[in-house]
Image: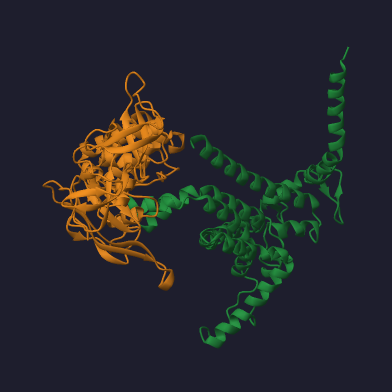
Amino acid sequence: MIKNQGGTGVGKTSVEARQIAKHFGQGEAIVKALDNVSVEIGQGEFFTLLGPSGCGKTTLLRMIAGFESPTSGQILLDGADITPLPPNRRPVNTVFQSYALFPHLTVAQNIGFGLEMQGRPAAEVKDRVARMLALVKLEPMAGRKTSQLSGGQQQRVALARALAPTPKVLLLDEPLSALDLKLRKEMQIELKRLQTETGITFVFVTHDQEEALTMSDRIAVMSAGHLQQVGTAREIYNNPVNRFVASFIGESNFLPATLEAGKARLKAGGLVEVSGAKGQTGPITVAVRPEQVRIVAAGEPDALPATITNLVYFGTDTHCHVDLADGTEVVARLQSPATGDAGLERGGKVGLRFAPGAAQVLGD
Amino acid sequence: MATLEEEAEVQSRRNAWLLSAPALVVLFAAAAGPLIIVLIYSFLTPATYGNVEWIFSLEGWKGIVFQHDIFSDNLVLADANLVIFWRSVKLSFITTVLTFLVGFPTAWFIATRSPRARALWLFLITIPFWTNLLIRTFAINQIIRNEGVLNTLLLKVGVISEPIRLTYTDTALLIGMVYVYLPLMVLPLFATIDRFDMRLLEAGYDLYANRWQILRRIILPITRPGIIAGSILVFVPCLGAYVTPRILGGGKNMMIGNFIDLQFGQGQNWPLGSALSITLLIIVTIALLAYVRTIGGENRHG
């Protein structure tokens, strides 16, 4: 079982998943969409479930919403077991990937739908809809049908509709995936603003690591029905627990090595300082982020000898691919110098160094 | 001087008209022609043995609502005619409602099957169309008559102690018409439900709506075009139904279709029959116009 590594702050737990399992099919053909997943989400937290498609993140989200029931385990909301409750009796609202706006209703009617179904008085509904329209800056569109709106506007209506009944938790199922890059960046900022302004717990599902890193208070990385790591963006990026997390979030160089008195003896030769070792023995993998790799002159003390195999220019930075003595490929991300020429060339002999604390021992 | 190109243009346009002429002639003769004849006949005087005399008269039109009192020869309200009109509209309306109540769950069921099962179900729905209407109606009669399948079964099971008399009642007529027109309701409903985004149900459910509210506030408003189309497709032919009321209603429970038939047959009052036909056409046109207007209104906002 994986413990929460990042603090949830001092806040209380909002949503808790307790040993959730979800199996599809039976016997030989059984598919474990979720395998014994436990996670605690704090009140007012922006929590992201991150993973590749099919990792079970959407299944977990739909379980919190009530659209799926777990094969075993419990979903708790503010400490109370809500596992048997249907979606319409859970104080939780969802922003759907497809938005699922009601095509026969206007923007204002869409936003007011949840409040009306809750049986709130008409005056309150009207007032709250007006406040929501202002919150998502769609006042001029109140009377439009949703089909007359752009993708970004539809997205905001979906948000306002889900926020209008003031849910205890807002669930967001890859809500930005249908938007183009520029709009997606805008909406990321917008979402974060809404979350801060409303103070509602957000549970956000995405496969986009950048989205996860920029918006989340904490991230849960999932793969194949398992929770791989839970923590803040910094913890997950700087201290990935295993190879999956290290390669899924950002890019990493993986170097085979063995442990030697707290240091790692690389297969390519050379002894490097590492962190994250938990008493492993035998062969290990050391992960280093490309931007933490320094290129120095060949023959400098403590530098690993390497040969440049390729240089790829990306504008702001240049990726320098090098081969170590044993043929292991390492990528170094260098800031492009103002002169446009770092004095490196393909086939050149150089030395490699890792920034202090950059080399991480992986758990697997 | 016309250039060669312009000449070719004129030539091709003339050819287009020439080529479509046969179709246009057939269309006119088959669609507009008979209607015009019926319209003219409705303003003529009935001849003694059917047919018409070419003397202008409004008697046919008056005959729809009035009749000559046998004793005083005054015009009095023809309540028998009005009863037939009323029964036709009433039975057609009830049939429409019943086909909707049966057809909507059926269409929903089919639309939510897998593509292969869906094709099979749709095929089963359309099978009755392959059999002659007359035979299907007689079959219904076999089921509901006193010694029929239904009564025999109920008697055997002991639900009833004596047969329910259904033949030649409005109930028999309704059973027959619902059976005959059900596919016409199911197919357009299926078409709209098939396009219905099932994810909206989750959205509604998520926003605190219960099952009934989801049906009333989401499903029915969105599938309204299909409901209206199906209702028109059932209501219109029901109004003019002839075979079903003739067989299942006996001679007594007439509908407009039978009444029109009577005027051209035994009644030997072709102008009245023609006027009745035109009246039926007007009712249908009004219903269709109402349909077009509601759909048009939808599009203007959507």
Q: Colour of chain B?
A: green
- From the viewer's side, name the closer residue of B94 and B229: B229
Q: Residue B192, position in %: x, y? A: 54, 51
Which image quadrant is residue A250 in?
top left
- Determine the residue positioned at 67% across, 77% down: B142
Asked if residue A31 is positioned above or below residue A332 in the image, the reply reads below
Q: Residue A318, position in %: x, y? A: 36, 29
Q: Residue A301, position in %: x, y? A: 21, 35
- From the viewer's side, name the closer residue of A288 and B171: A288
- Res. A46 visible in picture: no
Q: Residue A327, position in %: x, y? A: 37, 45
Asked if residue A330 is positioned above or below residue B94 in the image, the reply reads above
- Determine the residue positioned at 60% across, 51% down: B232
Whether residue B279 sits left or right of residue A265 in the image: it is right
- From the viewer's side, name the closer residue of A352 and B217: A352
- From the viewer's side, name the closer residue of A224 and A289: A289
Extreme front residue here? Answer: A299
